[in-house]
Amino acid sequence: MADTVLCTVDDGIATLTLNRPDKLNAINYDMADTLLALLDRLETDDVVRAVILTGASDAAFSAGGDIHEFSQSVALGANAAVRDFVRRGQAMTARLEAFPKPVIAAVNGLAFGGGCEIAEAVHLAVASEKAIFAKPEINLGMPPTFGGTQRLSRLAGRKRALELLLTADRFSASRALDMGLVNAVVPDEDLMACARTLAARIMRHSPLAAASIITAVTRGLNMGVAEGLLTESEQFAKLVPTHDLREGLDAWIARRRPHYTGA
Ligand code: COA
């Protein structure tokens, strides 16, 4: 059986490719587990400074949770369905959201259900002009379960999110851009280059500073402002003894380019 997620590393950027093209990259349990295991590996690989997540198909980024598989868990009852399907999917999107290196989705085609929830959870996203998004779970008589009831309303606002969640209407890449779900929409042939350029623009900076910004923003969004400000202050305090912060300040004062070591 082919790997459900492919991983290549090139110039400090790991590219993870959801790889069930015959099934429109539907996320089965194996794919979620493989993605989580790869993220564990990439987190501690110092060569890797950013991650790009895309889909192996002309047509699809991902058509969401594997309905054939999770309907079997549903048939076993609420405990099995929550344990095997919901918790696994929520763990996957939460891990992407909190990953300490920037994760960029390159949305190459349809992003439905869990595919859209991945785009919601990652730090940055670029979309091909041909990408199509949808929150189709209501068609199946259920709400989204990989964080899709929580993150889109924070990104796009409650009413825009509820319209999409309650209608299941498909929406274009340009609407996703208007809503803040993606950062840029580009011609299909430029998608991966655009994602790599975005990664490279971040990789000029200290990886420690990038990690602390991701952590402070992510935790802050998931808590009240007072706790968020505390997190911001804690993240800054952790950087105070590092070479990279001293170097960033010294380089600015000396009007030279900083040389970050990630230490
Ligand atoms: N789970 C499992 N299999 C899926 C899937 C999903 N979410 N989405 C697509 N597939 C499979 C199909 O079963 C089909 O496999 P088969 O050829 O072995 O039968 C293959 O991928 C191609 O899908 P198909 O439905 O034939 O393509 P289409 O172009 O006619 O339709 C969609 C595309 C996306 C509209 C349709 O596949 C769909 O509605 N998928 C489910 C989307 C969804 O509800 N996601 C949220 C799940 S919680």
Image (cartoon, rainbow, N blue to C red):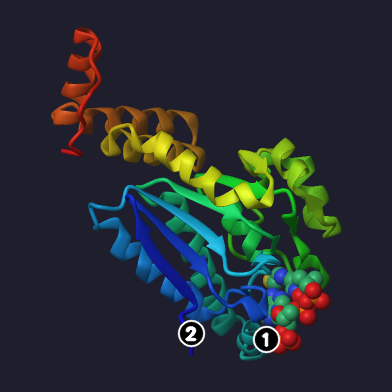
- The CA span between labels 1 and 2 is 19 Å
Relative image position of residue 64 (x, y in whole percent) = 65, 69
What amino acid does circle 1 point to? His
Q: Residue at x 18, y 26 (%)?
A: 240
Closer to the camera in the image, 145 or 255: 255
Labels 1 and 2: the sequence-earlier one? 2
Q: Mark 2 falls on what kind of element?
A: loop
Residue placed under numbered mark 2 in the picture: 2
Q: Is 167 rendered above or below residue 22?
A: above
- Is residue 162 placed above or below 183 in the rendered structure? below
Residue 261 percent location from the top left of the image: 17, 36
Q: Dot 2, crowdedness within 10 Å: few (<14), some or many (≥20)?
A: few
Quarter holding the C terminus is: top left
Q: Which residue is mark 1?
A: 68
Q: Secondary structure at mark 1?
A: helix
Ligand 1 closer than 8 Å to label 1 CB: yes
The quarter holding residue 220 reads top left
User: Percent from the top left, x then y, of residue 259?
Assistant: 20, 28
Q: Quadrant of ligand 1?
A: bottom right
Q: Judge left or right: residue 52 versus residue 63.
A: left
Residue closer to the observer: 225 or 2: 2
Residue at the location (56% across, 79% down)?
28
